Amino acid sequence: MKKYLIQKNPFVVPTTDGKLIEEHHGLASTENKNISIAHMIAPPKWSEPFQTPEFEEYTYIISGKKQFIIEDTIIVLEAGQSIKIEANTRVQYSNPFDEPCEYIAICKPAFDFNKVHRE
């Protein structure tokens, strides 16, 4: 049994909002239920509806800025910063800025659209 997996072909999640989502590890790409790791690029002026996911989400900003509304608090992260958002927390992700935001998102357990609970 091989002790490692090099991901060369991440699953590109189909989107209609211009956001690039490349899942390297997770349910869609490697059938891993425990964790998902995705490379993302959110275009300028992008946003998602509020959601209350059943999983923890970690975000690390590579470039640009990303806005989070967590419950009633607005937080803006910049390149080199990261955040952990606990499971079952109401959150909205957006990039209201004029430049793309490139980041890594890690969900534990893995991202599952049936457990994200978008409004």
Image (tube, rainbow, N blue to C red):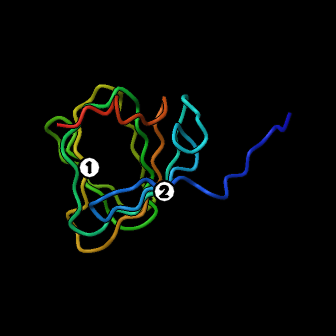
Residue reaching furthest right?
Answer: 1
Q: Eyeballing the image, is 82 above or below 2?
A: below
Whether residue 79 sits left or right of residue 77 in the image: it is: right
Image position of 114 with respect to 6: above or below: above
The residue labelled by disc 2 is: 12
Q: Nearer the viewer, residue 77 or 11?
A: 11
Say what amino acid the circle numbered 2 marks: Val
Percent of width and height locating residue 66? 30, 58
Q: In which quadrant of the rendered image does the N terminus lie?
A: top right
Displayed quadrant of residue 14: bottom left
How far across and down, in percent of the image, does residue 42 sit? 33, 62
Disc 2/disc 1 C-alpha distance (Å)? 19 Å
Q: Which mark is residue 115?
A: none
**Element at badge 2?**
strand
- The vertical placement of 91 against 77, above or below, is above
Q: Quadrant of residue 20?
A: bottom left
Instruction: Determine whether label 2 and label 1 are within 8 Å by CB.
Output: no
Residue receiving disc 1: 93
Count of numbered circles in the view? 2
Residue positioned 57% across, 54% down in the render: 10
Residue at 35% x, 29% y is 86
Query: N-terminal of the two: label 2 or label 1?
Result: 2
Name the residue rendered at 61%, 41% in the picture. 30
Mark 1 neighbour density, 10 Å: few (under 14) some (14–19) many (20 or more): some
Mark in front: 2 vs 1: 2
The answer to which of 44 and 6 lies nearer the viewer is 6
**Closer-to-camera residue (89/41):** 41
Callout 1 secondary element: strand
Identify which residue is drawn at 53% across, 52% down: 11
